[in-house]
Image (cartoon, rainbow, N blue to C red):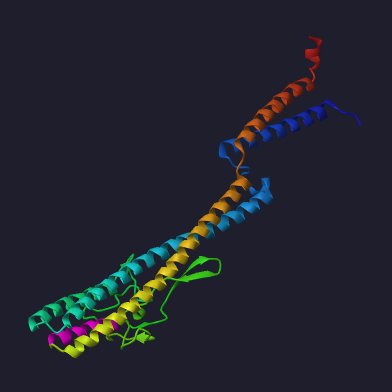
Amino acid sequence: MRITNNMLINNMVYNLNQNLKTLERLQYQQATGKKFRVPSEAPIAASKSLKFNTDISKLEQYRRNTEDALSWMSDTEAALTEINEVLKRAYELTVDAANGTKHDEDLLKIKEEIDQLKKHLVQIANTTFSGRYLFSGYSTDKPLLSDDGTYNIAIKSNEVFSYNIGNLEKMEVNITGLEVFGVDGSFDAESADIGDKPELIKILEDLSTALENNNTDGIQESIGKVQSSQGHILSVRAKVGARMNRLELTQSRLDLNINNAKELLSYNEDVDITEVIMNISMAENVYVSSLMVGAKIIQPSLVQFLS
C-alpha cells in the first residue's frame, strides 16, 4: 500500500490530538481531584459512585433520624425525671402529714403545696419539643391536659410513632401521656376520652381533699398510691433509657458505616495527586515530542525545497 504524505500528516494530527486529550484529562484531574467528569469516561467507576452516594445519603438520613429521636427522648426523660421529683416531694409531704401531730393549719399548708404540685404536673404533661407536645400521641399539635387537669384530647395507648434508624429497622420514639399519667385508677388503660381524669392528677386531688378534711385514713391511703406512682414512673424512665442506649449504639454504628462508605467513594473517584502530577509531566513530554516529530513529518514544499 502506498503511504502518502497526507496519510502521514493525518496520522500525526490524530496522535497529537490523542496526546492533547490525555494531557487535558490529567489537568482536569489535577484541578478537581476527580478521576472522571462524565460516566462515559469510566462507566464501572461511575456506577459504583452512584451506589456509594445513594448509600451515604440513606445512612446520613438515618443518622439525622437518630439525632432527632434522641433529642425527643432526652426531653421525655427530663420530663419524667421532673414528674418523679414532684411525686417524691408529694410523698415526703404525705408522710409528714400522716404522722398524727399536725394541726389543721399545718395540713392546709401542706394542701396548698400539693395543689401547686398538681399544677406543675399539668405543665409537665404539656411539655413540648420543637413545637410538638411530647405526650399527646398523634395529636402533637394539642396539649395533653387542660388547665383543670383533665384530658384535653382523646388518646389511645397505641398512638406511638417510629423513626427509621436503619434498613428495615425502626424505633418507637414517643411515650403516650396515657402510659405516663394513667386514667381510671390504672396506668394500663387502652384509651382516655376528653374530660377524663388522669390517675396521677386524681391521686394528688384526693390527697388534697383528705388534707383539707383532716381525713387520716385518706392521707394514709395516699402514701401507698404516691409511692406506687413513683415506681411506675421509674419503670417508664427505664424504658426510655433503654431506647436511648440503643439509639446511641445505632448512632456509633451509622457513623462508622458513613465513614467507610465515604472512604470507598473517595477510593473510587478521587485521584492520587502525586501520581497525577507525575503523569502530567510525562504527558507534557509526550506532547512536546509529538510536536517535534510532527514538524519533521511535514515535508517542505517544492518552493521551500528549491530555495
The relative height of residue 297 versus residue 142 in the rendered view (above or below) is above
Left or right relative to 114: residue 238 = right
Measured from the top left, where is residue 299 in percent x and y?
80, 20
The relative height of residue 26 versus residue 111 in the rendered view (above or below) is above
Identity of the residue drawn at 32% across and 71% down = 80
Identity of the residue drawn at 53% across and 60% down = 58
Residue 223 in magenta? Answer: no
Measured from the top left, where is residue 86 in percent x and y?
25, 73
Identity of the residue drawn at 70% across and 24% down = 288
Identity of the residue drawn at 79% across and 31% down = 11
Foreground pick, 181 / 113: 113
Whether residue 152 is visible here, answered yes or no, is no
From the image, give the main secondary structure of the stretch colored magenta: helix
Foreground pick, 250 / 174: 250
The relative height of residue 243 versus residue 57 in the rendered view (above or below) is below
Left or right relative to 118: residue 154 = right
Question: What is the quadrant of residue 156 in the picture?
Answer: bottom left
Left or right relative to 262: residue 304 = right
Question: What is the quadrant of residue 176 in the picture?
Answer: bottom left
Question: What is the quadrant of residue 111 in the picture?
Answer: bottom left
- Say which quadrant the C terminus sits in: top right
Foreground pick, 142 / 260: 260
Left or right relative to 61: residue 156 = left
Whether residue 22 is visible here, answered yes or no, is yes
Foreground pick, 295 / 61: 61
Measured from the top left, where is residue 247 in percent x and y?
46, 64
Q: Which residues are magenta?
A: 199-212
- Say which quadrant the N terminus sits in: top right
